[in-house]
Image (tube, rainbow, N blue to C red):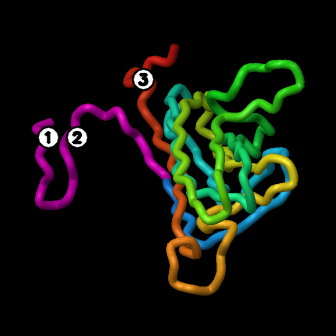
């Protein structure tokens, strides 16, 4: 092919071919949850079927988080279909909770933008349901896309923001995981 887009809209050859598929969601409302064990945040549920059984998926999220007080927040990507944590997360260390990523929210007036990315090899072209799980430490409340302050006025401490979850599918030969 000549890598030229035809007048008909058909591309003879795009070249490269490393990204096979991308699916993304933006969550623009806000919600809260209690509990110190990461649980499914259904607002980020996404079904994804890889186009090739040997492809590699890159999970990326940007979450706007807060808590009702000084608190640690923790998250992971989760395969709902197979009941398994997806990608990188902390090693086992005694009775400590294992997380993909986390942050510390200093006070309830503050929103933190928390980003994380990890690789996953699903080994199938069947559709799999994925999500993000999250929690805040102790008896604190985890807030997504808002602060713990959240009064009905026009200050930044009361703003509503957005969070995203994106899955990129890469051709197997384009990525080497070690």
Residues at marks 1 and 3, CA–CA distance in whole angstroms: 23 Å
Residue linked to disc 1: 3
For the point 63% across and 43% down, the residue is 103
User: Total marks drawn?
Assistant: 3
* Magenta stretch contains residue 150: no
The tag earlier along the polypeptide, 1 or 3, is: 1
Residue 136's x, y, as percent? 76, 50
Q: Which residue is found at the position 81% from the left and 56% from the top?
A: 140
Query: Image height check: is 83 above or below 63?
Result: above
Which residues fall within the magenta stretch? 1-23
> What secondary structure do most residues of the magenta stretch adopt?
loop
Query: Looking at this view, is 108 or 96 the one in front?
Result: 108
Quadrant assignment, res 80: top right
Residue at numbered disc 3: 175
The label on residue 46 is none
Residue identifier under label 2: 14
Q: Residue at x 74, y 58 (%)?
A: 69
Q: In this view, does 139 lie to the left or right of 64?
A: right
Q: Looking at this view, name the residue that lies furthest to the top.
A: 178
The quadrant of the image that shows the N terminus is: top left
Which tag, 2 or 3, sits closer to the chain's start?
A: 2
Lower sequence index among marks 2 and 1: 1
């Amino acid at each position: 092919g000549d890598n030229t887009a035809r007048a008909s809209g058909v591309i003879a050859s795009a070249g490269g071919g490393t990204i096979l598929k991308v699916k993304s969601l933006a969550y623009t409302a806000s919600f809260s949850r209690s509990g110190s064990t990461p649980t499914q945040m259904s607002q980020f549920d996404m079904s994804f079927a890889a186009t090739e059984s040997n492809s590699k998926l890159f999970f990326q999220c940007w979450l706007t988080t807060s808590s009702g007080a000084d608190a640690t927040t923790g998250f992971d990507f989760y395969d709902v279909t197979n009941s398994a944590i997806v990608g990188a997360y902390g090693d086992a260390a005694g009775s400590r909770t294992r997380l993909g990523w986390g942050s510390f929210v200093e006070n309830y007036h503050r929103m933190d933008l928390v980003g994380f990315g990890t690789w996953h090899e699903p080994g199938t072209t069947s559709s799999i349901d994925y999500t993000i799980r999250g929690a805040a430490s102790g008896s604190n409340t985890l807030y997504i896309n808002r602060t713990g302050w959240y009064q009905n006025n026009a200050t930044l401490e009361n703003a509503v923001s957005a969070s995203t979850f994106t899955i990129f599918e890469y051709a197997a030969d384009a990525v080497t995981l070690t």
